[in-house]
C-alpha cells in the first residue's frame, strides 16, 4: 500500500474533521454544528491550497 505525503496542516485539519464527525455518528448536524463543520472544512481547503502552491 502506497503512503501519500500529506502536509501537516492539511492532515491535522482532516483529523479534526474526522473526530468532529465521529462524535456525531448516526445523526444529522444541528445548525451550529453545521457551521462549525464548514469552518473546519474551510481550514482544510486552505491548508491543501497552501500545500499545492508551495509544492509541499
Image (cartoon, helix red, strand yellow):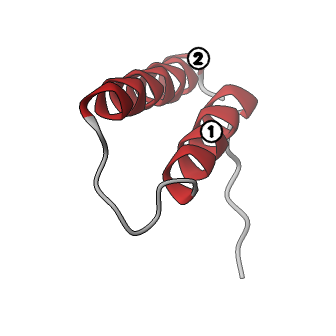
Question: Which quadrant is the N terminus positioned in?
Answer: bottom right
- Which residue appears at 53% of the width and 42% of the height? 17
Is 35 above or below relative to 3?
Answer: above
From the viewer's perspective, is residue 15 above or below residue 9? below
Please provide percent x and percent y for residue 34. 30, 33
Q: Residue at x 39, y 69 (%)?
A: 26
Q: Residue at x 41, y 25 (%)?
A: 36
Front one among 19 and 2: 19
Q: Earlier in the sequence, mark 2 or mark 1?
A: 1
| Residue 20 on image: x %, y % | 55, 44
Q: Which mark is residue 54?
A: 2
| Left or right of 7, for residue 28 | left
- Location of residue 52 in the rendering, given as x and y in whole percent from the top left corner: 50, 27
State the image coordinates of residue 37 (x, y, percent, origin top left). 40, 33
Q: Foreground: 53 or 35?
A: 35
Q: Is residue 22 above or below residue 53?
A: below
- Quarter-of-image position of residue 30: top left
Mark 1 = which residue? Answer: 16
Q: CA distance from mark 2 to mark 1?
A: 23 Å
Task: Residue 47: give its label.
Answer: none
Amino acid at each position: 500500500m502506497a503512503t501519500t505525503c500529506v502536509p501537516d496542516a492539511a492532515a491535522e485539519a482532516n483529523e479534526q474533521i474526522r473526530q468532529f464527525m465521529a462524535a456525531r455518528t448516526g445523526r444529522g448536524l444541528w445548525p451550529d454544528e453545521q457551521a462549525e463543520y464548514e469552518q473546519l472544512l474551510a481550514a482544510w481547503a486552505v491548508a491543501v491550497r497552501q500545500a499545492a502552491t508551495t509544492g509541499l
